C-alpha cells in the first residue's frame, strides 16, 4: 500500500511575502536580488533629496548643486569692507577721472560706496533692499547739496557683488575663464539675460601674485576689479585693506539727509 504525501496546496499558491522570511533564507539568489533592490531604492530617494527646491534660490545655484570646489563654496563673504581707488573715462570729455574712498558690502543688496577724495568727486551712494540714496555735497557753503532718493532697484555695482555668490565657476548667471599673464586674472562673462538685468557685460578680477590656481583665488586676495558695462564703459577698482566678515552698525546702510540739501525723490 503506497502512502500519499500530504501536500498543502494553499501554501504553494500564497505569495512569497505572505509566507514569512523563510523563502529568503533558503533561496540565496532571491535574497541577494531583494537586497540589491532595496539598495537601489535608497539611493534613488537620496538623489531626490539633493534636488529639492531649497537648493535653488532665486536662480542662484547653491554650492550643493553646482560648486564642486571647496574654495568656491563661499567665495563671496556675507560682509566685507575695503578701501578703493576708482578710475574711469568720462563720457563727456573722454578724460580719465579718479577717486578714492571706502566700500562696505553686506549680502544681499547692501552697499555703502563713499568717494572721499578729491573734493570734486566727493559723493556717497548707499543702498539696501528697500531704498537707495545718492548724495553729492555742496562745493561751498552757499550752495546746497543734493540727494537722489529712490526705491531700491539695486544699482549695477550692488547687483555685481550679489551675483558673485556663484563663485569662480560657470553658473546660470555667468561663465568664467582665465586670462593669461603674470597676474592671475579671471574673466567673468555675464549671460545675456543677467547682463540685461544688472547692466554689466563682463568683469576682470585680478588677485595678488600668491594665487597660482583657482583654489587659491579667495575673495580676500582680490587686488582689482575692472567692470565693463552694457554701454562698454569701463570702471577700474583697485582694492586695499580688504576685510571679510565685518560687523556693521544697524544703520550703516541707511542715509541721514543733512540740512541744506535738495531732495530729489524719484
Image: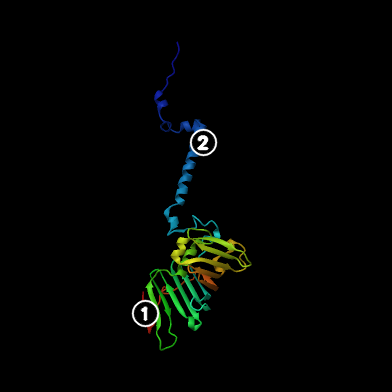
Quarter of the image for residue 211 reads bottom right
**Between 210 and 183, the one nearer to me in the picture:** 183
Name the spot of residue 239 as percent of width and height, x first.
Answer: 54, 73
10 Å neighbourhood of mark 2: few (<14), some, or many (≥20)?
Answer: few
Name the spot of residue 217 as percent of width and height, x first.
Answer: 57, 64
Q: Would you name the residue on which mark 1 appears?
A: 263
Badge 2 marks a residue whose secondary structure is helix
**Between 243 and 264, the one nearer to me in the picture:** 264
Residue drawn 40% across the image and 79% down it: 147
Quarter of the image for residue 214 reads bottom right
Question: Can residue 74 be seen from the camera position used here?
Answer: no
Residue pushed farthest right?
182
Left or right for 19, reference 188? left
Badge 1 marks a residue whose secondary structure is strand
Q: Quadrant of the N terminus?
A: top left
Instruction: Give the number of callouts.
Output: 2
Q: Would you name the residue on which mark 2 appears?
A: 32
Q: Quadrant of the C terminus?
A: bottom left
Residue drawn 45% across the image and 69% down it: 156
Left or right for 265, reference 86? left
From mark 2 to mark 1, how far is it between C-alphas? 78 Å
Q: Colour scheme of this structure image?
A: rainbow
Earlier residue among tags 2 and 1: 2
248 versus 10 height, above or below: below
Question: Can residue 201 be seen from the camera position used here?
Answer: yes
Name the spot of residue 103 as percent of width and height, x first.
Answer: 49, 74
134 versus 33 height, above or below: below
Quarter of the image for residue 16 reads top left
10 Å neighbourhood of mark 1: few (<14), some, or many (≥20)?
Answer: some
Amino acid at each position: 500500500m503506497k502512502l500519499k504525501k500530504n501536500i498543502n496546496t494553499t501554501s504553494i499558491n500564497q505569495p512569497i511575502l505572505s509566507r514569512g522570511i523563510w523563502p529568503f533564507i533558503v533561496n540565496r539568489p532571491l535574497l541577494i536580488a531583494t537586497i540589491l533592490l532595496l539598495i537601489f531604492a535608497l539611493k534613488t530617494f537620496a538623489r531626490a533629496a539633493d534636488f529639492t527646491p531649497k537648493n535653488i534660490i532665486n536662480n542662484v545655484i547653491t554650492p550643493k548643486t553646482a560648486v564642486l570646489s571647496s574654495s568656491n563654496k563661499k567665495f563671496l563673504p556675507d560682509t566685507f569692507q575695503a578701501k578703493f581707488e576708482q578710475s574711469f573715462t568720462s563720457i563727456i570729455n573722454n578724460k580719465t577721472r579718479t577717486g578714492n574712498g571706502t566700500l562696505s558690502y553686506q549680502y544681499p543688496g547692501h552697499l555703502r560706496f563713499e568717494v572721499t577724495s578729491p573734493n570734486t568727486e566727493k559723493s556717497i551712494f548707499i543702498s539696501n533692499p528697500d531704498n537707495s540714496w545718492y548724495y553729492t555735497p555742496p562745493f561751498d557753503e552757499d550752495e546746497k547739496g543734493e540727494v537722489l532718493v529712490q526705491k531700491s532697484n539695486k544699482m549695477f555695482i550692488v547687483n555685481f557683488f550679489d551675483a558673485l555668490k556663484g563663485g569662480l565657476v560657470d553658473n546660470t548667471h555667468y561663465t568664467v575663464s582665465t586670462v593669461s599673464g603674470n597676474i592671475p586674472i579671471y574673466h567673468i562673462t555675464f549671460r545675456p539675460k543677467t547682463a540685461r538685468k544688472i547692466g554689466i557685460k563682463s568683469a576682470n578680477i585680478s588677485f595678488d601674485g600668491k594665487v597660482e590656481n583657482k583654489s587659491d583665488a579667495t575673495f580676500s586676495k582680490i587686488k582689482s576689479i575692472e567692470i565693463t558695462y552694457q554701454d562698454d564703459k569701463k570702471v577700474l577698482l583697485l582694492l586695499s585693506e580688504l576685510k571679510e566678515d565685518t560687523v556693521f552698525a544697524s544703520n550703516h546702510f541707511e542715509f541721514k539727509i543733512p540740512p541744506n540739501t535738495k531732495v530729489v525723490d524719484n
